[in-house]
Image: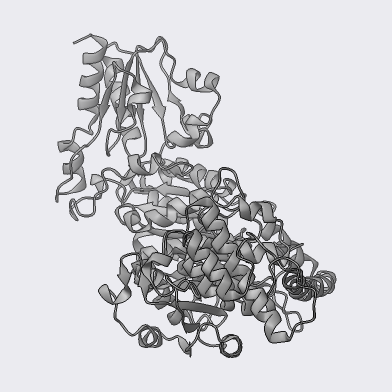
Amino acid sequence: MSSTAQTNPISPSELERLCIDTIRTLAMDAVQKADSGHPGTPMALAPAAYVLWSKILRYDPKNPLWPDRDRFVLSCGHASMLLYSVLYLTGYEISLDDIKSFRQLDSKTPGHPERGMTPGVEVTTGPLGQGVGNAVGMAIAERLLAKRFNRPGHAIVDHRTWAFCSDGDLMEGVSCEAVSLAGHLQLGKLGLLYDDNHITIEGDTALAFNEDVGKRFEACGWHVTHVADANDTAALERAYRECEAETTRPSLIISRSQIGFPAPKLMGKAEAHGAPLGKDEVRATKEVLGWNPDVDFAVPEQSLAEWRRAAAESAGHSADWKRRFDVYAREFPDLARELTDGFAGVLPAGWDAAIPTFKPSDAKGGQLATRKASGKVLNAIASRYPALAGGSADLAPSTDTLLSGETDFDAEHSGRNFHWGVREHAMGAALNGMAAHGGVRPFGATFFIFSDYMRPSVRLASLSELGVLYVWTHDSIGLGEDGPTHQPIEHLSSFRAMPGVVLIRPADANETAQAWKTAIEHSHGPVGLVLTRQNLPILDPEKYGGVMRVDRGGYVLSDAPGAKAILMASGSEVSVILEAQALLGARGIAARVVSMPSTWLFDQQAPEYRESVLPASIKARVSVEAGSTWGWDRYIGSQGIAIGIDHFGASAPGGTNMKEAGFTPEHVAREVERLVQGK
């Protein structure tokens, strides 16, 4: 085969090989030019990608976000040149110059696929196993929307999710959880191709991995099929078709490949995984393929024409869907508008009309745990926002996240209540997939301490600007007797350090209501609501309702003329500093109380607003939070005091823990008095 201009007629099998080898040479050349990357897996997976994109997948490069497209996830994100090559060849907005700029600053071809940076990339992948969980979430979203919007004769939501994964993906725990969940839910429109190349960075997978993957998936309720030779395109197509025919179980294709195929020296070796092949090996491989070894980034005309022909044929599905949707819209205008708005992120009119206002008389003793208030607010919103769906990692009774009157999402039903099981890893990854799919606003809940399991997914949600909602309860040592294993200490600080994560820790039921409203309106990144197990005083809306501004992150809750000190806190400690303010007032020390439910939101405000809340002229400042003191220095300054807990908690009643750690009005007042008096 020639390198750049192949105009003589060739046979279908030769044309197929040419299309496949174009991926291989582009991957080799891009990695070699960047002097960085992973060439071996794109080379091995080239036939699987060719068959999928030319014969199976429904996509439209000119309309890459049409709602009923098939979703593709490259979970083995290190093989990004496979996806970039295919996107260029099929006509997405990615050029050959973009391929040549692989891994360079501000290019459309970063080292691992990033959502929003490259047209055609559905999710940000790289941390292995996450993409498998994303694909599960996408299949969940498809079923959820199909149940909500399809009507007899109008299958307006009817697509599949495909994903490629590697040995490394299947070793990671997140994928194990996701695979178990997908089998339990019988996600029949999910197909996973496993690149079984027996190679990881350190060498042969036998060093650490010898399980029977097929049997494991079968035990989890998956349909499993095998392709003995990853270069056998006929066998690959049969396997894909077999997956399409399987409607009650998710499907796994185990495709046996040789990494770096057909590099003569490095094929099948670990050296082909995570580094350029080297100029000599690239040259030798091109000679094996019959390509001109002196030409880089060659794209034969017949190859490009065939790829574009396949893309144009697939684009017909997009045009057909548009015609069918227009008919649907005439018959079901309200549903059509809801579907369109859902994908556009437009909230329904009046979605927040039922959000309650809480009075002290609404709860026994005038106190209510913010997790309990959250459950009431969540249900009020869900009643008017049908795109909202989610659940808990086996903790719904404790996190108060069950949607009343809604059915469950399980193998037989497609309701809005999810039971993720004890699978925080999979829950986090699937939530990202649901959000990336579109049309669904997902939420997931667990104890705040178990957000540790979700941290990689939360980070990817932020990096991808996905509007995922997290309900994290049991937020401090105040949860009590479960002890230090369940009492989060550093978690507030660590999530605040994560770029783009909006953490909101409301002070009472009414701040919780505002927190939910703020979270729903923040659609371009993840929001975590951090809530108490213990009851908190309900701040009287007649006294404080006019000043509460959770949406601004921090605000003056209670002021005093001629204030000499500022008390600031989040969550359960706000009621503590309100009492401390009263004690100080009786001692002749005027103090301002600032509620700081979200440092991230506060930091986004204009400097003038921040100065109005925390005026530089008041030097005596005390922060009070039942967590690590890290980060509060930027608000209290060099002369302030941070009252917190920088050690693990203890197994004791919550009230005892809080008192022992100094979260009492008396202790706070003493510290403020010491500051003001310069002691």
The answer to whether residue 652 is above or below residue 306 is above
Please name whichever residue, 461 or 356, is drawn nearer the observer in this view of the structure.
Answer: 461
Residue 170 location in percent, x, y? 38, 73
The answer to whether residue 124 is above or below residue 197 is above
Q: Does residue 462 appear anywhere in the picture?
A: yes
Q: Which residue is drawn at 35% across and 64% down?
A: 201
The answer to whether residue 200 is above or below residue 442 is below
Q: Which residue is drawn at 35% across and 52% down?
A: 473
Picture quarter with the N terminus: bottom right
**Figure quadrant of residue 160:** bottom right
**Figure quadrant of residue 146:** bottom right
Please name whichever residue, 186 or 227, is drawn nearer the observer in this view of the structure.
Answer: 227
Left or right: 543 in relation to 451: right
Residue 73 location in percent, x, y? 55, 67
Picture quarter with the C terminus: top left
Residue 612 location in percent, x, y? 50, 18
Total residue callouts: 0
Residue 116 location in percent, x, y? 61, 52
Q: Residue at x 80, y 78 (%)?
A: 8
The answer to whether residue 277 is above or below residue 101 is below
Left or right: 384 in relation to 358: right
Q: Which colour scheme is used?
A: one colour
Please name whichever residue, 265 or 623, is drawn nearer the observer in this view of the structure.
Answer: 265
Left or right: 534 in relation to 383: left
Please name whichever residue, 458 or 597, is drawn nearer the observer in this view of the structure.
Answer: 458
Q: Does residue 434 appear anywhere in the picture?
A: no
